[in-house]
Image (cartoon, helix red, strand yellow):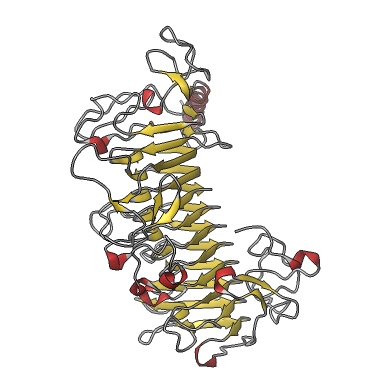
Amino acid sequence: MSARTSIGQTICCCMVLICLLLTIGVASAASATVWYVRTDGGSASQCTGKTDAGYPGHGTQQDCAFNHPYQLLPPNGSSEPMQPTMMRSGDTLQIRPGNYMMGYGAPGQTSAGCDVPYTWDCEISNIPSGIDAAHPTVITGDCKTLPELWGTQRAAAIFSLQKAHDVKIACLELTDHANCIENYRPTSNTGGVTACNRSKYPYGPWAANGIYAADMTNLTLQNLDIHGFADYGINAGRLSGNTLLDGVTLRANGWGGWSGDLGGNDHSSSSSGTIVVQDSVVAWNGCSEAYPAMTIVGCWGQNEGGYGDGFAEAWTGGDWTFVRDDMHDNTQDGLDLLYANGSGTTVVMQSRFYGSAGNQVKISGPSSIVDSIAVGNCMWTQQKKGTSMSGAMQATDDCRALGATVELDFPLSDQQAVLAFNTITGQGDGLIDASQKGNGNTVVLVNNILDGRHSDKRGDEPTFGYYGGDDNAVPAIWIGNLVHGVRHGACPGDSVCEDPLLRDPAFATYDPAPRSGSPAIGTASPKVNVRTDYYGRPRPRPMSIGAVEYLAGPQGDHRPPGH
């Protein structure tokens, strides 16, 4: 046999193998099952779960839906063998609108999965991996009317996702029915919030987390409303591949919205790959909800023994992107990626940050913030004084860590952060603060409005526009910015230093659109171009400075729709 013939046969065999593998993948996807859950369904013995219909009231193995997710995905105790599930790779579970109790005592829960007093183990943790990225395993509700899955009896989470790949959870409301925060310490002025009962069963209608995720590859969380949990909305780390949060709300979770810290040593939670957070809201974390009214009560922060970051990571790698997000009124920082280790990048676009009690944005390493609005109105206790929201917060919580609106850090050398076409204001010590552990890092400021008209939290002098540190300072490159009212009357580089004439400069109602006659209109440097503004509207040429493009005529007479 000639060498050419041998190579030809090898190539042919490889092609046959590839075709065979593709055929197996297509066949697996085609054979995937759609399962149904609805409130008028039946048990796993009464119904097959494969038909979207109620249980007729008699018979076994009828063509009808299950009455609870546990009929398909029974919860698992940590000390017990993994409970089997009928769900297979690439299957879909469709949950119809309604109210579903999740935890000890719910339909389909067995003693093999969880028992007293270890009821915190009653969580779904046996979701199978998908086939591949194009054919994930899916758990979804009705996207027009979200089903409510509420945790009870100290459940550690509604979903515990571990060591799997290609999983999607969508269109669900996750919450609990208690007004408590785990390990809550304040005893007065708390709006009725108490420490959750951890001592003895029955623990009450509360759950610690909405979603726990560890060692997951290609995880998608979409159109989820996660609120009112005793610990975190989402506690996730060691993620890899492509992670997507799309249209996720994290609201009023007692310790924080998103926590990337799974415990262990400083590096044991680090994620990799790409993480995209888009069209999401992260608000009022560090607070509780007064069930069933859902009003915000009992807020607390670090000085009271709590926490309260909106979206925070432990030491992590990965490339992070935040697009069209809204993060506000958290009791510590809004977005805290200060522990990004510099091996990846952070990109923030068309997002708004305001009203959190610490820094609005903290990022580390190579980064860019574009077309975004950051309002550092961090005097939390004064703004919420006399309301149920003030809770146990103290004046020392205001403008935590000096309250710089945007905090930048460089853990390595020769890296760059670019801030372009943003509008930034605040009442902390500075609008933009930078520090470096390495050398040769730079901050590039292009076509931003730095609005320093508000005094800092002490009320005795204006805020810094940019502060690069005293020792080993981080230099800034200034191109085409509009700077107003900052400390010492600074007018760096080629900046325009006049009142930007914004539509509404008041903190509570801040509208950064320029008014007619604003020096921001049409004066942006052409050295950096962007196609759209904060609202996604096309920018004409010449462009305006800041996050919001000027619109003349009737369109410019009202606040455009958006956040």
Does 479 sit left or right of 531 as displayed? Answer: left
Frontmost residue, 410 versus 484: 484
Above-or-below relation of 168 to 497: above
Frontmost residue, 502 versus 546: 502
| Quarter containing the C terminus | bottom right
The residue positioned 47% from the left and 56% from the top of the image is 282
Above-or-below relation of 254 to 130: below
**Can see residue 94?**
yes
The residue positioned 38% from the left and 52% from the top of the image is 253
Where on the picture, by quarter, is residue 339?
Answer: bottom left
Does 516 sit left or right of 189 as displayed? Answer: right
Where on the picture, by quarter, is residue 429?
Answer: bottom left
**Can see residue 2?**
no
Above-or-below relation of 214 to 93: below
Does 514 sit left or right of 278 as displayed? Answer: right
Above-or-below relation of 529 to 48: below
Frontmost residue, 280 versus 15: 280
Frontmost residue, 283 versus 449: 283
Q: Pinpoint residue 143: horizontal percent, then vertical percent.
A: 56, 37
Residue situated furthest right in the rendering: 553
Q: Pinpoint residue 371: horizontal percent, then vertical percent.
A: 60, 66
Report the number of numbered marks: 0
Residue situated furthest bottom in the rendering: 488
Q: Pinpoint residue 416: horizontal percent, then vertical percent.
A: 48, 73
Q: Pinpoint residue 468: horizontal percent, then vertical percent.
A: 43, 82
